[in-house]
Amino acid sequence: MLLEGKVAVITGSTSGIGRAGAVLLAKEGARVVISGRNQERGQEVVSTIKKQGGEASFIAADMLAVADIERLVKEAVATYSRLDIFWHNAGIVGPDSIKDITQETYDKMMAVHLKAAVFGARFAAIEMSKSGGGAILFTSSVAGLKQSGFSMTYSLAKSGLVMLTRKLAVDLAKDKIRVNCLCPGRVQTGMRPDISQERARALGISAEEWEKKDKQRIPMGRFVTEEEVAEAALFLVSSKASAITGVALPVDGGFLAV
Ligand SMILES: NC(=O)c1ccc[n+]([C@@H]2O[C@H](COP(=O)([O-])OP(=O)(O)OC[C@H]3O[C@@H](n4cnc5c(N)ncnc54)[C@H](OP(=O)(O)O)[C@@H]3O)[C@@H](O)[C@H]2O)c1
């Protein structure tokens, strides 16, 4: 197993990509701390992992609150005595543009994606340094490398994660902490139907028609699965990627190559 003896904290692992990542990392031997705001969904992920013979626990934390992020890392270390992997994956979407942006929307988008990544990495790096290193991972997006027509603040926050990845990779290399980010393309998770409906409405077509058009923009002609993103995450946090730090890895069916 790739992650035998390792302890991983995954934010936003109560559903979607984070859930798939938690299940896979646990299958590879990691003890996984599931996190999010939704207790019921968090406990469901914990029982799925336990049924598979893995080890996991749920710690509720709101990524909008730095105090929650600090408590999450501290409680994880108190539970499992160490921290090897910190994956900040929690995220939200919503349409916005320069003409309709509000201070509240801006602050929330930046806080969940970027501020939480900065402080999560801070608290995680302190703990990882004590046990000789580790791996930090962020979930950015193709929208972090190519502007998104859907949300200005989402693109802005996700591109910030790409730069944060590079900055931290340089600064934390001496502590043997690798820092990378994933840039998934379109993945059919809970947040996608809202996006499809919103985009379709803007174009005056049905959500199904929009999704068909959307797939045509992807060279592989299909969306990416949660499990495929999880496999990329597993690679980046495992010793298989021991010389890889500071990268933004697209998992996008070729979308960015066009
Ligand atoms: N789906 C895609 O096409 C796609 C593409 C590129 C990148 N991504 C990124 O992938 C990540 C996961 O998204 P997903 O597609 O798997 O969507 P999802 O199923 O909606 O999952 C989002 C996760 O974020 C958590 N979350 C949201 N706000 C939070 C908050 N304030 N505090 C704590 N947790 C919070 C949710 O947990 P609770 O509800 O329990 O709080 C949930 O576990 C996000 O960063 C997203 O931007 C997704």
Image: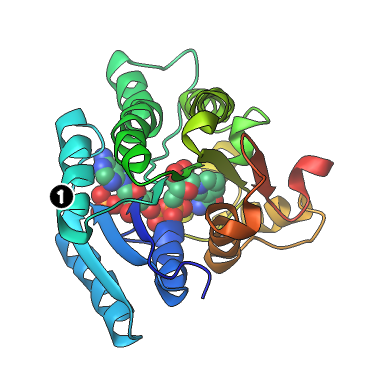
Q: Nearer the viewer, residue 50 or 122?
A: 122
Q: Nearer the viewer, residue 131 or 189?
A: 131
Q: Position of residue 170 (x, y in %)?
A: 57, 25
Q: Residues within 10 Å of mark 1 (few under 14, many from 20)?
A: some
Cβ(mark 1) to ligand 1 < 8 Å? no
Q: Position of residue 107 (x, y in %)?
A: 31, 20
Q: Position of residue 55 (x, y in %)?
A: 28, 74
Where is 158 relative to 142, above or below? above
Where is 135 relative to 103, above or below? below
Q: Quadrant of the C terminus?
A: top right
Which kind of residue does numbered mark 1 sit on?
A: Glu
Give the image quarter of residue 94: top left
Give the image quarter of residue 35: bottom left
| Residue labelled with disc 1 | 75
Residue positioned 56% across, 30% down in the render: 169
Q: Nearer the viewer, residue 46 or 6?
A: 6
Using residue 169 as the reference point, say whether residue 99 is left or right of it. Answer: left
Q: Nearer the viewer, residue 230 or 33?
A: 33
Report helix, strand or loop for mark 1: helix
Q: Is residue 234 visible?
A: yes
